[in-house]
């Protein structure tokens, strides 16, 4: 969580105010896996330390947009190759993220139903959830910040893709068009 604060602070000047209409975009290609167009002015997250993409067999990127309450709006696109270390199948990814992890929802998070949808011209399973972040993380009385997330999971013969959107609730609607433009531009290079 502290990482989110630091990243949000670093990009708050670059990101500017909430965008209602995403301007012309910046094309991004992730190796031989996919291409998309991110909104102009959004900032690419640098790779973190740890296992490489090749070791995890998960290839992707995250871009940061506007910031509110110290949290940046984010759009991510990832390809999960067969045999990846995180989520073996698209069904397992959906099961883990579309409902409470332990089957009990103790803190009032809201999970939408999984529905058919599209990412570009490709079939997807889509769902949303409304969760919380507590900031500052180690405070005695942290502020509860409402977060909106949307997921589009695209199964392919060899693995699957996940396009996700993460935003503080008060900025979610204004920036959702940016996510929709990324979805519309999505082109898998692996099938």
Image (cartoon, grey):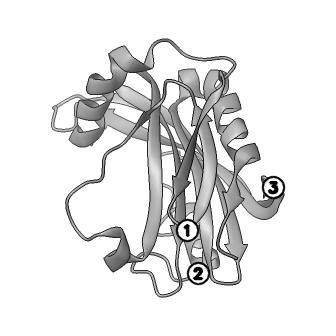
- Residue 159 place in picture, x, y as percent: 60, 79
Q: Looking at this view, is 21 or 127 the one in front? A: 21
- Residue 184 place in picture, x, y as percent: 76, 45
Q: Looking at this view, is 175 or 183 the one in front? A: 183
| Label 3 environment density (alpha carbons within 10 Å; few <14, some 14–19, many ≥20) | some
Drawn side of residue 124 relative to residue 146, left or right: right
| Disc with the residue nearer the chain's start (2 vs 1) | 1
Residue at left offset 70%, top offset 66%: 154
Residue at left offset 22%, top offset 30%: 136
Q: Looking at this view, is 142 or 52 the one in front? A: 52
Report helix, strand or loop for mark 3: strand
Q: Are marks 2 and 1 in contact (CB under 8 Å)?
A: no
> What is the spatial separation of the Cα atoms under label 3 and label 2, in whole angstroms?
18 Å
Report helix, strand or loop for mark 1: loop
User: Is residue 136 positioned above or below 58 on the image?
Assistant: above
- Residue 157 place in picture, x, y as percent: 70, 83
Q: Which residue is mark 2?
A: 89
Q: Are marks 1 and 3 in contact (CB under 8 Å)?
A: no
In the figure, residue 113 lies in which quadrant? bottom right
Q: Which residue is mark 3?
A: 118
> What is the spatial separation of the Cα atoms under label 2 and label 1, in whole angstroms?
20 Å
Drawn side of residue 187 relative to residue 123, left or right: left
Residue at left offset 38%, top offset 18%: 14
Report helix, strand or loop for mark 2: loop
In the figure, residue 145 lies in which quadrant? top left
Residue 32 image label = 1
């Amino acid at each position: 969580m502290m990482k989110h604060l630091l990243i949000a602070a670093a990009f708050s000047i670059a990101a500017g105010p909430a965008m209602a209409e995403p301007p012309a975009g910046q094309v991004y290609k992730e190796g031989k896996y996919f291409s998309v167009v991110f909104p102009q002015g959004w900032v690419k997250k640098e790779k973190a330390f740890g296992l490489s993409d090749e070791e995890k067999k998960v290839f992707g990127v995250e871009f940061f947009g506007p910031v509110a309450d110290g949290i940046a709006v984010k759009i991510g696109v990832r390809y999960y190759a067969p045999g990846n270390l995180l989520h073996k199948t698209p069904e397992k990814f959906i099961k883990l993220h579309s409902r409470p992890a332990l089957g009990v929802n103790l803190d009032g998070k809201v999970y939408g139903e999984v529905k058919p949808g599209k990412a570009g011209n490709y079939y997807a399973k889509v769902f949303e959830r409304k969760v919380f972040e507590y900031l500052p993380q180690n405070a005695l009385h942290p502020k509860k910040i409402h977060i909106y997330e949307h997921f589009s999971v695209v199964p392919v013969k060899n693995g699957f893709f996940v396009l996700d959107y993460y935003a503080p609730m008060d900025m979610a609607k204004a920036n959702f068009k940016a996510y929709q433009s990324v979805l519309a531009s999505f082109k898998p290079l692996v099938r």
